[in-house]
Amino acid sequence: MRYTICLLLLFTAACSRAPKTANEVVAVRSAAIPPEPGDSAWDDAPEYAAKLIPQDLVEPRLMTPSTPEVRVRSVTNGSEIAFRIEWDDATQSDTPGPARMTDACAIQVPEKLEKDLPEPQMGQEGKRVQVTYWRADWQATVNGRGDTIRDIYPNATVDHYPFESKALEKGSEAEKEMARRYAPARALGNIRSGPRSQPVEDLVANGPGTLSPGPSLGAKGKGVHEKQGWAVVISRKLPEGLSPNQRTHMAFAVWQGAQQESGARKMRSGWVPLLWKGE
Amino acid sequence: MARVYNWQLGREMSYWYPEARPQRQFAAVFDTNKCIACQTCTLACKTTWTSGKGQEYMLWNNVETKPYGSYPLAYDLKLLDMLNGQQWNGGKYEGQTIFESAPAGERVLGWRPEQQDYAYPNVGEDDCAGQVDHGEFLSLPHMNWFFYLARICNHCTYPACLASCPRGSIYKRPEDGIVLVDQGRCRGYQECVRGCPYKKVFFNPMTGTSEKCIACFPKIEQGIQPQCFVNCIGKIRLAGWISPPAKARPENPIDYLVHIRKVALPLFPQFGLEPNVYYIPPIHAPVSFNQQLFGPGAGEAMKTYRNAMNDPDMASLLCLFGSTEMVVSRFRRQGDQAVATDERGSELVRVPLREPIHVRPAADLKNQLVRINCP
């Protein structure tokens, strides 16, 4: 009898540790969106393993497969939806530079709830997709990395920047204007690097090569790297028109910087059903 | 891929987009024989355009000592190796370009320099080719040699950077053929860095975008030559406009040197980009080396240049290099003077083919002085 009880206890303990799994992404109700990947609220959501394939439809293609899958959990508070995306990547690549790519991931959702889905790879003409994109170097910046070349290359020596001239008053508009002259992308508001408040951005696309800034969906994010890989939380507004117990679809993409992956060179999934599980 | 005509190869070739030549094409001729590698051009560009954060390592203009110098390191040797030896048949290129030899899944045959490849802006500076060992105390002419190769973006007719960008962030301006990275659209994938065989696109880690030489387009738009041209103290450079060969005009300085006299040649035409910076090859370097860099016309170009002193029209044009800040649209020789005019035909400058020589005797009898040459 004692032996049977011990076995039963062991079995119960094993069951409680094993993640609940699902054959689709299931967003479960949570009072609040958990901002950290380690929050216990994620334990209530079942895990879905989305298989990834190399992007091999348009050039440049990814010819060597890397990340085989992402493990996904989802919660919603009724207005926002969040995903915790985990994948194996022992190398933390979060420093940009020549031939230095950074780790990244993205989720994709059709802009409209309709039966005929857009093409799974970046949508198509007339059928836009919404993309929420997270990047490791942005995370490092949000975590406090500074905005100087020495924050990336600690041994860098800089003789002089024109905008640090003694003739320019520190913090003055004239100084900022001079700095903008030598950072044309920043001057145009294309903040691909540098100070930012969130490590994610809202984008839209209607086909490969068309990715561009989209209307704000209130995207937020947080990524944490541990030994085995990344755990990233991405949250955004619920897809428009989605009701409890209704489905839409989503897709995933992952870039491993150490494998020189960026842009079109990525691992991606096809469309995966996403269910908002009703109360 | 589309089929396009590349006159530098003497044949059609494959390219990612159909042929779309601009209304006119920015071009330049660099006379390598006059370059002293003072790097004034490099600094003129650096202070004007790349003094910002993340641009510290960038040299949109650089001068490298050939045969060893290269920036980034071995940019040329690496790709020549990847192309694995290709053949010319007279003026026709029978080998493969970087577009035609693109591996599966790629748009062009390319590679991406590592960070340390940018750490040696002129490795082998002033190093001669060949070893002297115990011989060759002084046997001429030039068994051992080097020369200086000044480089900017070639604003190619078929840019590999433009073809490589999967999101169309690079464009070639229809009004002047200048190739630019749209800083509002670039997402920093570095495909252009990988694709450009001349490695003249650079990734800026502080803006997260790629940047490149803009041919000083705000100056070009006003008819003024770029910074690296007007600051060149060796007067090796001339900016202007090149016509397709069938429309070459002898009064156009670039057409005259490139198409009519064929003394100025493209850099690595075999890559297939139809680059628009043309070089008068160094006349003291081996023909075989010049042919590898500048194509099969190098030997004839060297002969033509050597004879320039007996060739008054050619000499007059060479005298106009560095003689005016403005873009020279037309030139003519008037007796022993070279005359440069702008697009409207207004005279820009007039220079003598030979400066008058004044000899001052060492002994000044009038003032009872002996003149010496003071440094």
Image (cartoon, rainbow, N blue to C red):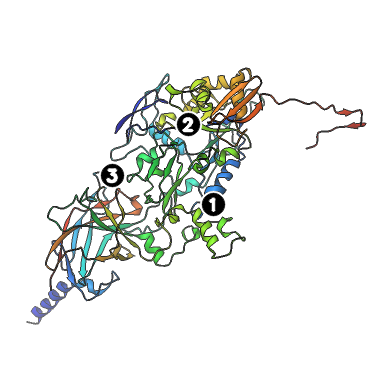
Crowding near pointer 2: few (<14 within 10 Å), some, many (20+)?
Answer: many
> Residue B333, image x and y in percent?
61, 21
Asked if labels 3 and 1 share a chain, the reply is no
Q: Is mark 2 on a helix, strand or loop?
A: loop
- Return the residue found at the far bottom: A2
The residue that disc 1 covers is: B51
Residue pictured at 57% horizontal, 25% vertical: B331
Chain letter for mark 2, please.
B
User: The residue under label 3 is which amino acid type?
Assistant: Arg
Say which of B81 and B287 sits in front. Answer: B287
Quarter containing the N terminus of chain B: top left
User: The residue under label 1 is which amino acid type?
Assistant: Ser
Q: Is mark 3 on a helix, strand or loop?
A: loop
Quarter containing the C terminus of chain B: top right
Say which of B26 and B269 sits in front. Answer: B26
Count of picture labels: 3
Say which of B147 and A133 sits in front. Answer: A133
> Residue A156, image x and y in percent?
53, 56
Position of residue B47 relative to residue B4, above or below, is: below
Question: What's the CA distance linking mark 3 and mark 2?
Answer: 30 Å
Q: Which of marks 1 and 2 is nearer the N terminus?
A: 1
Left or right placement of residue A52 versus residue B96 in this view: left
Q: Can residue A155 be seen in this view?
A: no
Chain letter for mark 3, please.
A
The residue that disc 2 covers is: B267
Q: Is mark 1 on a helix, strand or loop?
A: loop
The residue that disc 3 covers is: A61
Q: Do the residues labelled 3 and 2 touch (CB within 8 Å)?
A: no
Of the residues tagged 1 and 2, which is closer to the observer?
1
Question: What's the CA distance linking mark 1 and mark 2?
Answer: 28 Å
